[in-house]
Amino acid sequence: MAEQISAIRGMNDIFGTDAQAFDYVINTAQSTLAQYGYQSIRLPLVEKTELFARSIGEVTDIVEKEMYTFNDRNNESLTLRPEGTAGCVRAVVQNGLAHNQVQKLFYSGPMFRYERPQKGRYRQFHQFGVEVFGLSSADIDAELIVLSARLWEKLGLDTLELQINSLGSQAARQVYRELLVNYLSQFIAQLDEDSLRRLHTNPLRILDSKNPDLRAIIDGAPKLLEHLDDESSTHFEQLKTHLDDLGIEYVVNPNLVRGLDYYNRTVFEWVTTELGAQGTVCAGGRYDGLVEQIGGKPTPAVGFAMGIERLTALLMDKQLVPAQATPDVYMVLVGQDVERPGLVMAEMLRDALPTLNVQMNCGGGSFKSQFKKADKSGAMFAVVLGEQEVAKQRAIVKSLRIEAEQQSVGWSELAGYLNTQFNLS
């Protein structure tokens, strides 16, 4: 026997109830986005490495330590996408979709980061992303937040907390960055290894440190909200007004900075305390300079991504995943040469009654074993075809859930009979 091959660590098979929950999140998100006029876009899994170095930032943890990067046969450096926004921006720029027009897009699929696998953090993980191009006002920021709130309501998730902040303009943030470095430099002996590494490359990320030993230092740091430029300050106040009008509760978190260099102005996260360390289930914000940074003309943009695995974990913990659809009818086929008319009849019923869920027994088996399968399937009725029924072009319809006399129904009347039983018209 050959040695069994296992999946790569941190890259998981998703099946059974987990897959059902996974599909439920994506389908619910797609239907929600359709309510708001967003359209689907499909993006490559692999991009040029330069795209992520230029957009995410060369001194971020993602680019420095976490990307799956390789040279192809033409010796070109390629990377499995670690996030979706950069690829979406590249797509709208390359295809002429960004300049002087509004695009409201969504996508979903796997992302890849070489991290230490743990609950809610995997090397292959899945995101649902939403991006808007061509709108600079705070109302679209508010729309993204309220549509995500509507999604949580549809999913039954009522314990998520919204945290918001503003990072201001690039120029204002550069001034603040100098203030922050000067402040943190007083505590070099107390900073941990990650913070020391970030001090002169990406100091704002220190504010987001989860190290409890740094909490007092971080709490005493200058607040970015107190050093915003006037336009960003006005934008943030407008966002809060919109959220108040919409009845969306939020917490202003001055230490919320996000881990990617391209963000400016609005940033937000939906967080939970029910998943341990990996508490962020949805995060995003505004990235007005990224389109130009990737080679397009200046275009305002804003978006968010949500982690499918983390949302499905919440749904599973709270038992909020809808039960798998059961068949309405289970077809029991017994005897010689019954499979052929059985297949034809099953398709005839699906054609005549598109909403009817018909499951046909395949692989043979005794009458008793097939009836056990029919009962276990959860179907309301069994439709039985035996040799005698085929000869007479009739079918036996037997109720599996309530006491009722079985009926012998002609093939031409079967769809109408079931239509009446299920009240499908």
Image (cartoon, rainbow, N blue to C red):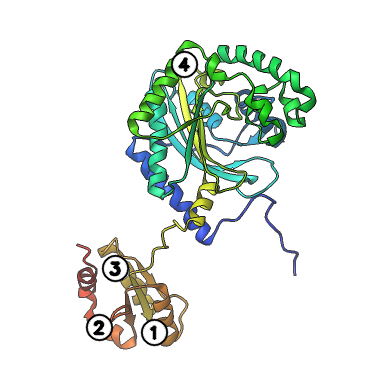
User: Are discs 1 and 2 less than 8 Å apart at CB?
Assistant: no
Residue at numbered disc 4: 233
Q: Quadrant of the C terminus?
A: bottom left
Mark linked to residue 348? 3
Label 4 to label 2, Cα distance in Å? 70 Å
- Label 3 crowd bin: few (<14), some (14–19), many (20+), radius 10 Å: some
Amino acid residing under circle 2? Ala
Alpha-carbon span between mark 3 and mark 1: 19 Å
Proximity of marks 4 and 2: CB atoms separated by less than 8 Å: no
Foreground label between 4 and 3 = 4
Q: Which residue is mark 1?
A: 334
Q: Is residue 356 left or right of residue 62?
A: left
Question: Residue at left 75%, top 27%?
Answer: 191
Q: Which mark is residue 404?
A: 2
In the rendered view, tell whether residue 392 sits above or below residue 315: below
Of the pair 117 and 234, the residue shown nearer to us = 234
Q: Label 1 crowding class (10 Å Cα cut-off): few <14, some 14-19, many 20+?
A: many
Q: Secondary structure at mark 2?
A: loop
The CA span between labels 1 and 2 is 22 Å
Q: Position of residue 162 (x, y in %)?
A: 47, 36
Question: Identity of the amino acid at label 3?
Answer: Met
User: Amino acid under label 1?
Assistant: Val
Instruction: Give the amino acid type for the residue marked by disc 4 in the picture.
Output: Ser
Quadrant in which residue 362 is drawn: bottom left
